[in-house]
Image: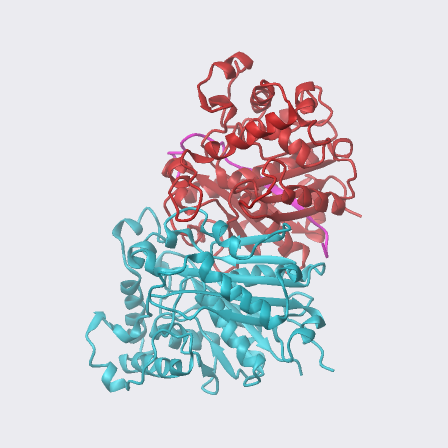
Chain colours: A red, B cyan
Amino acid sequence: MNQRCAVIGIGQTHHKAKREDVSIAGMVREAARAALDDAGMDYGDIDAVVIGKAPDMFEGIMMPEHYLAGALGAVGKPMLRVHTAGSVGGSTAIVAAHLVATGIHKRVLTVAFEKQSDSDAMWALSVPQPFAAPLLAGAGGYFAPIIRAYINRSGAPNDVGMKVAVKDRLHALKNPYAHLQLPDIDLKMVEESIMLWDPLHYLESCPSSDGAAAMVIAAEDVATAQEKSTGRSAAWIHGMAMRSEPTMFAGRNQINPQAGRDCAKDVFAQAGVTNPRKELDCAEVYVPFSWYEPMWLENLGFCDEGDGWKLTDSGATSLDGGDIPWNCSGGVLSSNPIGASGMLRFLEAALQVRGMAGEHQVADASKALGHAYGGGSQFFAMWVVGSDRPA
Amino acid sequence: MSTAPQPKQGTRPVAIVSFAQAPTQRRIEQANEVELLMPVISEVYAQANMTKDDVDFVCSGSTDYLIGGPFSFVTALDAVGVWPPKRESHVEMDAAWALYESWVQLQEGDLDVALVYGFGKSSLGDLQRILALQLDPYTMAPLWPDQVSLAALQAQAMIDRGLATEEDFAGVASRSRRDAMNNPNAQVANDLDVATLLKEEYIASPLRRHCVPPLSDGAAAMILVAGDRAFDVVDRPAWITGIDHRIEAHAFGVRDLATSPSTTKAAHMAGVGEGDVDVAEIHAPFAHQEILLASALGLSSATTLNPSGGPLAANPLMAGGLIRFGEAANRIMDGTASRAVAHATSGPILQQNLVAVLEAAS
């Protein structure tokens, strides 16, 4: 990064199965307005808007950013629309941050959303395409065989996924924005829920949500001034990285993808992190299906390959006494407005290091990871944010 | 020895060093998106004497609504072969904005080479129905207004204001299609005079057939290189010395359709008026839009407009804007121009516009 930059404003909607009370414009504006208020700014202070969402078929609107230009105060300004599959919320934040880190703009508003109730994501994901492997039964149908291969390869006990499902829903009870609020959640409840894609029970899968996320990313001088005027601290960006690899080819490691390992290595090198489990205080990682927690623990280097399930099993990733809490917000398993889910990970990491995560705050968090992935676990976006300015 | 000109935006000079496009056709049935892109991407590597291992960043522009399925950019990525894994991104916009994102990435200073590409096959569906879906979903899309009728409203607004006549529109079309006769990638090329064109029936008054772009299938790719390394690749790199883009309101009722304030603002920011412009490649799918945009860009009559034939000769959606950048860059690289303007548009009737100044090193 050429210049230091920081997150100075954060906003999100209350994520729900159906936001029938607002239009898409109303929904993204709810998040944007909250982020601007947090930053002590108004639409007029913003230099550029970067918006992201997953496939347009999820709502049935082609390039909805054109229609949203007015609602997001972008008229007369540069507006970019990012789409990198499920990782899009993360990569959108990264594109926005680059605009500031390069000195091109000082104050960028970045927004991501999905209003899944306007269409049917499962259907939109399952349209057969020539020469491409059909998803047929949505994302879960695609990932379940990979999860089975992980269990086979690692020898993990069968209940580890269910433990993740319970843990993240317990975390969600401490996050008023989370979609799923299941006060009675326990292993029995997960086990008794219907089997969707073996080994994934219904409650081991993410919900389908309407929601939006927004951040204001600012240059160092602006961030310093706003910290003073609002009394709220900034989350400094210590590193950001993206990596992609092809969906399939002979010999591809789909369980522990190279692109994820490379991306983690890059972002941790930028942030000066050599041992993520020790040096990070918490992580918000894209876990749409329970088993992706142990799988990503390994992929991101929080433990050795094959040991991810042991961390989960031991409670290391729980906000309740774990040494490296993952998804204190409840994660994707508790709220999944797909296009916004990656940005929610990035902004929850920022909330933690700002000390503004409320009931799901990790005490004295000073460095956190935000992570998103998409496609056939082939697109990765990550950032590390900290309470201190990067060296 | 040449030195790279200092850019108006950013701190690091970035140049277009190679460009290739698929010959545009009304309907390409024998190649899917990957097959359409592969020869084009191979060609930009060959021109630059590079392989995919030289590329630090990849960015593309496309839209799922042409193919009618999600993630069309994901399958298209197979044309690049991102293995080992690469830094890669995608915009659901014309690929000219993928160029913009790449230009931003190269400003960071740690990466030097970017591959940019875009593709679109309009033949896969009914474009008039598809493009109606990019309008306000609550108030406009349910009426299914087609893009030709919307463009006609804009053309009529220009006539009402006394900014242009139907003869002027025919003049743009006549010149464009004649110029296209020298462009092997063009789809519509002929030599018809204004009087002949004006005998055509209206499609949507005041627009006749010649005022409307062809439906096209196509793809394009280019390589950007940052810093003096560009001189190692090509004798006359096309340096991006200014670049900016702006968006306008979506609701037609709050816009003055006869002007393009977003283009004017972007042109000002890019520094278009700070020197003579030898050639401009303008992404004006409809004939009247070239007149509107040339005025909004502040170009004089000394500037040669769309010598490639422009979008009236070939208009592959999502690649059309990037092709303007490629054609303008080619004029710099082949020595016929030393300062050029490239323009791209997106959204209904010019809602969003991107402008860049390309220059040869002095």
Residue A110 spot, x, y in % from top left: 56, 48
**Residue drawn 63% across the image and 24% down it:** A359
Residue A109 spot, x, y in % from top left: 56, 49
Residue B56 occupies which quadrant of the picture?
Answer: bottom right
Asked if residue A328 shows in the view, the reply is no
Residue B342 spot, x, y in % from top left: 51, 73
Horizontally, residue A248 falls left or right of residue A263, namely left
Horizontally, residue B180 falls left or right of residue B85, namely left
Q: Nearer the viewer, residue B194 or B31?
A: B31
Residue B362 within the segment the image draws in magenta:
no
Residue sitting at the far top: A188
**Residue drawn 67% across the image and 47% down it:** A240
Q: Nearer the viewer, residue B111 or B346?
A: B111
Dividing the image into 4 quarters, which one contains the N terminus of chain A?
Answer: bottom right
Main secondary structure found in the magenta portion:
loop
Residue A5 within the segment the image draws in magenta:
yes
**Residue drawn 74% across the image and 24% down it:** A323
Residue A177 spot, x, y in % from top left: 53, 29
Looking at the rendering, the stretch of residues picked out in magenta corresponds to: A1-22
Q: Nearer the viewer, residue A26 or A92?
A: A92
Total marks shown come to 0
> Would you place residue A121 above or below residue B330 in this image?
above
Asked if residue A380 shows in the view, the reply is yes
Residue A115 occupies which quadrant of the picture?
Answer: top left
